[in-house]
C-alpha cells in the first residue's frame, strides 16, 4: 500500500481512500517537488524526542499545540471538519505531526489533480504556504495531531479561489522547473 496516491473523482464519503483503479501511487520525491516534506518519527516519545527537537530548531517551529479531532473532544466538530475539507490555502506553512490515530491530507499537484496522503501515527508533514489542500479524518474518525508553527500561529484559511494572493503566485512560481 502506498502512502500517497492520485484520487478518483467520486463524491462518495470523503473518509474513504478514493484510490484510482488501478492504484496510481505518488512517491515522496514527487511530493518534494510540490514543496511537501515528510518525516517519520517515533510518536511514543514525542515529549522528549531529540529528533523532533532538532527539526523544530532547524526550522524555527517555536509554537506547538495538540489538537484531538474526535466528535467528543473537538468543539464544533462537524463544522470544523467541513472547514478543513474545503479546499484552501494559508499564508504560512502548515506543519502537522500525527501523534495518534490517522487521517488524510489532500494536496493539488501541478496539473491540479488531487493527491491523497495517508497520515499515520509518527508522520510529520509540512505543506508549503500557498498550496491548495484540504484535510479529512478517515473511517476511524479519530486523530491526535501536533500543530507546529514559526512564531505566533495564524490559522486563517483562504478558500479557493485565492489565485491572486501573493503567497499563491509565489508558490506557483516556485514550481517552475522543479
Ligand atoms: C488545515 O488548515 O488544513 C488544518 O488545520 C487541518 C486539521 S489539523 C490536523
Ligand atoms: Ni490548511
Image (cartoon, rainbow, N blue to C red):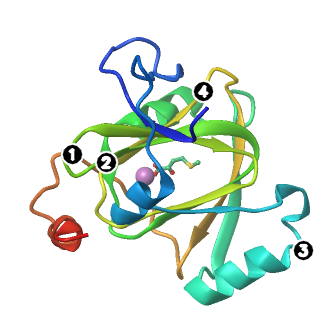
Give the residue pinned by disc 4.
Answer: 138
Q: Which mark, residue 51? A: none
What kind of element bears circle 4? loop
What is the C-alpha distance between the residues marked 3 and 2?
33 Å
- Relative to 139, does residue 154 appear above or below in the rendering? below
Give the residue pinned by disc 2.
Answer: 88
Precedes in sequence: disc 2 or disc 1: 2
- Labelled pair 3, 2 in contact (Cβ < 8 Å): no
Q: In the image shown, does 28 or 78 lie closer to the viewer?
A: 28
> Could you tell me which residue is drawn at 43 percent across and 68 percent down?
93
> Could you tell me which residue is drawn at 53 percent across and 22 percent down?
15
Precedes in sequence: disc 3 or disc 2: 3
What is the C-alpha distance between the residues marked 1 and 4?
23 Å
Drawn side of residue 99 relative to residue 105, left or right = right
Q: Which mark, residue 160? A: 1
> Could you tell me which residue is drawn at 53 percent across and 26 percent down?
78
- Relative to 114, does residue 52 appear above or below in the rendering? below
What is the C-alpha distance between the residues marked 2 and 1?
5 Å
What is the C-alpha distance between the residues marked 4 and 3?
28 Å
Drawn side of residue 20 relative to residue 136, left or right = left
Label 4 packing within 10 angstroms: few (<14), some (14-19), many (20+): some
Label 2 packing within 10 angstroms: few (<14), some (14-19), many (20+): many
Q: Position of residue 13 (x, y in %)?
A: 47, 14
Q: In the image shown, does 162 or 103 lie closer to the viewer?
A: 103
Precedes in sequence: disc 3 or disc 1: 3
- Labelled pair 2, 1 in contact (Cβ < 8 Å): yes
Q: Position of residue 72 (x, y in %)?
A: 74, 29
Q: Is residue 36 visible?
A: yes
What is the C-alpha distance between the residues marked 4 and 2?
19 Å
Amino acid at each position: 500500500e502506498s502512502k500517497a496516491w492520485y484520487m478518483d473523482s467520486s463524491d462518495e464519503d470523503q473518509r474513504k481512500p478514493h484510490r484510482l483503479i488501478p492504484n496510481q501511487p505518488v512517491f515522496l520525491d514527487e511530493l518534494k517537488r510540490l514543496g511537501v516534506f515528510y518525516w517519520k518519527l517515533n510518536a511514543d516519545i514525542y515529549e522528549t524526542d531529540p529528533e523532533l527537537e532538532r527539526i523544530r530548531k532547524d526550522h524555527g517551529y517555536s509554537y506547538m499545540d495538540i489538537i484531538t479531532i474526535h466528535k467528543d473532544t473537538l468543539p464544533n466538530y462537524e463544522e470544523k471538519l467541513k472547514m478543513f475539507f474545503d479546499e484552501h490555502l494559508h499564508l504560512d506553512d502548515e506543519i502537522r505531526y500525527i501523534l495518534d490515530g490517522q487521517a488524510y491530507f489532500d494536496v493539488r499537484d501541478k496539473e491540479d489533480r488531487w493527491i491523497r496522503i495517508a497520515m499515520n501515527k509518527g508522520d510529520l508533514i509540512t505543506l508549503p504556504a500557498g498550496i491548495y489542500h484540504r484535510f479529512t479524518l478517515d473511517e476511524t474518525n479519530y486523530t491526535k495531531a501536533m500543530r507546529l508553527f514559526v512564531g505566533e500561529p495564524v490559522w486563517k484559511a483562504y478558500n479557493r479561489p485565492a489565485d491572486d494572493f501573493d503567497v499563491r503566485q509565489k508558490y506557483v512560481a516556485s514550481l517552475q522547473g522543479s
